[in-house]
Amino acid sequence: MIRLITPKQKERLDFLRALDMHALEQARRIPVPMSARQYFNSQIADSLIVTASTGSITAITNIFSLAQASQAFPIGYGIAAPFAGQVYRFSMGGILTTGTTGTMVITPWYGPGGTGTGVNMGASIAQTYTASLTNGIWRAEGELVFRTISNAATASTAWLTGTFWGPGAAGTAGSAWVQTFGATAAVSVDTSGLAAANTFGGLNFSITFSVAGTVQAAWTSMQSLN
C-alpha cells in the first residue's frame, strides 16, 4: 500500500532535510583542534611509614630491606612491563649521622635485592661528606628512563640519574655536599620477570661510608611521569 503525504507534510520534510544539510555544512567548516600529547604523572606506591636504616656501617649496605624496596619503588614486569621511553621519578629523604672526616658512596640498584643481587645502575664517586653530623637532613631524587623493552631476560635497557644532598657544617656557608649517581651508558635490565629472583621489579639503594655512619630513610616516593 502506498502512503501519500500531504503538501504540508512534504513541506516540513523538505525543511528538515535542508536544516540537516545546513548543519552538516557548518560542521565541515569548524576546524578540528589538534591537542598536544598530554602526560599525567601518578604516584604508583605509598610512602614507607616505618623508617628504613642502614645501621652503623662502613661496608656497602642497602638502605631498604627487600620487602621495603619492593613496596616503595616498584617497577612492573612481564605483562605489566614499562614501555620504551617510560620515565619513573624516585625520591626519598630522612636523617643521617657521620663520623670523622671521610667519604660516602651511594649506589642505585635495579632489583629490590640491591647489593648482591640487583643490577648496578651507576654508583657515585666517593664524595667527602660533612663530618660529625647528628640527625643531619638528607634528600635524594632522580629519574629512571627505559630505552628498550624486550621479552627476553635481561635484554631491556634503562638509564638512571640521581642526586643526593647532605647538610653542611653549622655556620659555614656553602659547605653542604651534593653528589650525583647513575649510569654512563644504558644498562641491561630485566623487565620480563624471567631473570634471577630479586633482580627485577623494583629499585634499591645502598650506602658505603669510609668511616662508620648511619643513613635512615623516613619517607619515599615513586611516580610514573608518562
Image (spheres, rainbow, N blue to C red):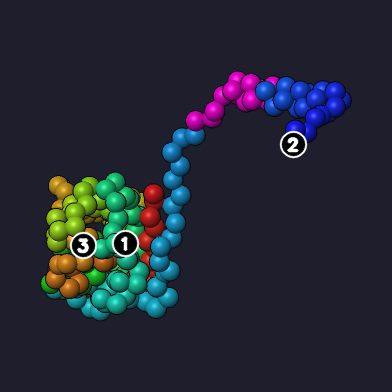
Q: Which quarter of the figure has residue 72? A: bottom left
Do the residues bearing badges 3 and 2 touch, measured as CB atoms within 8 Å?
A: no
Q: Which mark is residue 80?
A: 1
Name the mark on residue 1.
2
Rendered view: 139 above or below 53: above
Q: Amino acid at mark 3?
A: Ser
Amino acid bearing label 1: Ala
Disc 3: which residue: 192
- Residue depicted at 74% across the width and 36% down the height: 1
Q: Say above or below: 32 vs 142.
A: above
Mark 1, Cα crowd under 10 Å, few <14 / some 14-19 / many 20+, is: few
Q: Residues within 10 Å of mark 3 (few under 14, many from 20)?
A: many
Quick check: 184 left or right of 219?
left
Residue 10 image offset from top left, x and y in percent: 80, 25
Q: Is residue 77 left or right of residue 153?
A: right
Nearest to viewer (mark 1 / mark 2): 2
**Mark sitting earlier along the chain (3/2):** 2
Question: Where in the figure is residue 225, as x and y percent of width and height?
Answer: 39, 51
Q: Which residues are magenta?
A: 22-34
Q: Residue at x 29, y 71 (%)?
A: 69
Q: Where residue 87 appears, x then y in whole percent?
A: 32, 50
The three-letter amino acid code for the residue at tag 2 is Met
Task: Classify mark 3: helix, strand or loop.
Answer: loop
**Depth order, front residue of 151/44:** 151
Q: Spatial distance from mark 3 to mark 1, Cα to Cα? A: 9 Å
Which dot marks residue 157? none
